[in-house]
Amino acid sequence: MSAPLIIVGGGIAGLSTALAAAPAPVLLLNRARNSAGAASGMAQGGIAAPIGGGDTPQAHARDTCEAGSHHNDRTVVELLTGEAVAAVNWLQRQGVAFDRDAGGALQLGREGGHDRPRIVHAGGDATGAKVMEALVAAARRAPHIRRRTDVDVDGLLLHGGRACGVHALDADGNAEQIHGCAVVLATGGIGGLFARTSNPADADGNGLALALAAGAALRDIEFVQFHPTALALPGLHSLPLVTEALRGAGARLLDAEGHPLMDGVHPLADLAPRDVVARQVWQACRDGGTWLDARGIGTAFPARFPTVFGACMQHGIDPRLQPIPVAPAAHFHMGGIAVDADGRSSLPGLHAVGEVACNGVHGANRLASNSLLEGVVFGRRLGALLGALPDAGDMQGKCTLALRKSSLDVPRLASLRELMMQAMGPVRSGESLQAALQECSALAAQGWQGALAQVMLEAALRRTQSLGAHFRTD
């Protein structure tokens, strides 16, 4: 295969796809200068896998579908949970050193929506960073992978109704056309379209905008998960995450009067699915604020949760001595480019994997610590499929171009983020969605972020019943 497989995005999903495609040539295009721009590296909780005694893929699948309000594609869920242990083993072979207990067994944590401990982690709450470190190193060693950074893909090349490459801009704004045998979008999520997010700012839906411009189908784009516990820091866009594993270790959410926030709301209380907890925190923040009391973890805090501890101390909060102020933040997009279990989109030659894709595995609300797992399981599956493709031949000079719109300027993007946070947040109504849609129409004509937001608002209006993370007061 002379033409390379083009993968857009250097997070866990893109890297897993690239590594699994060996020995076929891969060109990995990354928007950021290095892997620090990937949301994968910010993941704190870990990776869910039915490793513990008595645990099964079926039990993991049941919790996944319960969290997803049974909007999930059950067949794809069973693929995910059935391959979870193999994914963890593969990551260990790539060099990921998961945390172990004194006896040498993998430590298992518990997070919201899980009926038992099944989360493996590395470096305490630094799992995403540790996994990214290992996969980036593996990709650098792999002779079949060529990586390019500071490349912004702003269009797809099409030939005979098939994706055959990308249009890209380098750091100096120079445009080029890059041809390949197939294109994989692994561009991450949409948190950057909201005023408060746990994602990096450039996780802004770029991959969805590319797919829209090329005419590929999208699916379930109204379903946006808000993490209930981001560190509440007024004025910041990207907020440090306060991992759910803290609640698994006994931390409690409190309202402005110091009362337990989740008592009587759900049988799992503080470990209820994220959509339930996020709505309670959202309302409590409007009533005076929400705090996470993790003082019971005590002196072990810096060793067990070094990422959260460092973020809190940086902002003058000692979580060993005082509750942590928290607020919901846009965290994960369950919807995305519509794909099958093998990552194929409705546009031949275009594939998607990870958060930008939607194969139905998460339903209406993602189960905690299934995101990194999804990237590895379906990335490896897609890489193996594409690595076996026959040579598509040279299509240079024969392609048409599907470009996304230009970007919104800074003031308009800030306005759009506030608009989306209020209308498409954890609590929605037909009235607020309709008003936001009218306001968004002008932004849609001015930049691709506005056009994408318009499509999301329209999808939310069409779904008139509450389901999972899409909660309508009307």
Image (tube, rainbow, N blue to C red):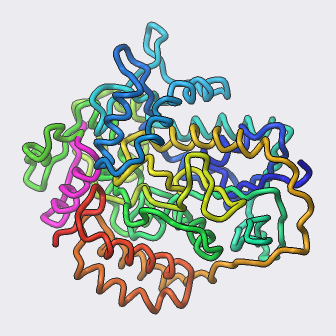
Give the extent of the magenta segment.
Answer: 272-294
Figure check: 328 above or below 442:
above
Query: Measuring 73% from the left and 58% from the top, which residue is drawn there?
Result: 183
- The image quarter containing residue 417 is bottom left
Q: Does the magenta run of residues contain 285?
A: yes
- The image quarter containing residue 426 is bottom left
Which one is nearer the viewer's eye here, 205 or 100? 205
**Left or right of residue 384: residue 87:** left
Residue 246 point in image, percent of width and height: 31, 36
- The image quarter containing residue 24 is top right
Which one is nearer the viewer's eye here, 81 or 264? 81
Quadrant for the C terminus, please. bottom left
Figure check: 233 above or below 362:
below
Say if residue 168 shows up in the picture.
no
Residue 132 point in image, percent of width and height: 61, 40
Say if residue 193 shows up in the picture.
yes
Outermost residue toward the top?
A: 103
Residue 338 point in image, percent of width and height: 53, 60
Query: Measuring 51% from the left and 59% from the top, which residue is drawn there?
Result: 189
Count the marks. 0
Query: Measuring 25% from the left and 71% from the top, which residue is drawn there?
Result: 464
Q: Does the magenta run of residues contain 378?
A: no
Query: Measuring 45% from the left and 77% from the top, which residue is drawn there?
Result: 455
**Left or right of residue 408: residue 49:** left
Figure check: 451 above or below 359:
below
**Left or right of residue 189: residue 416:** left
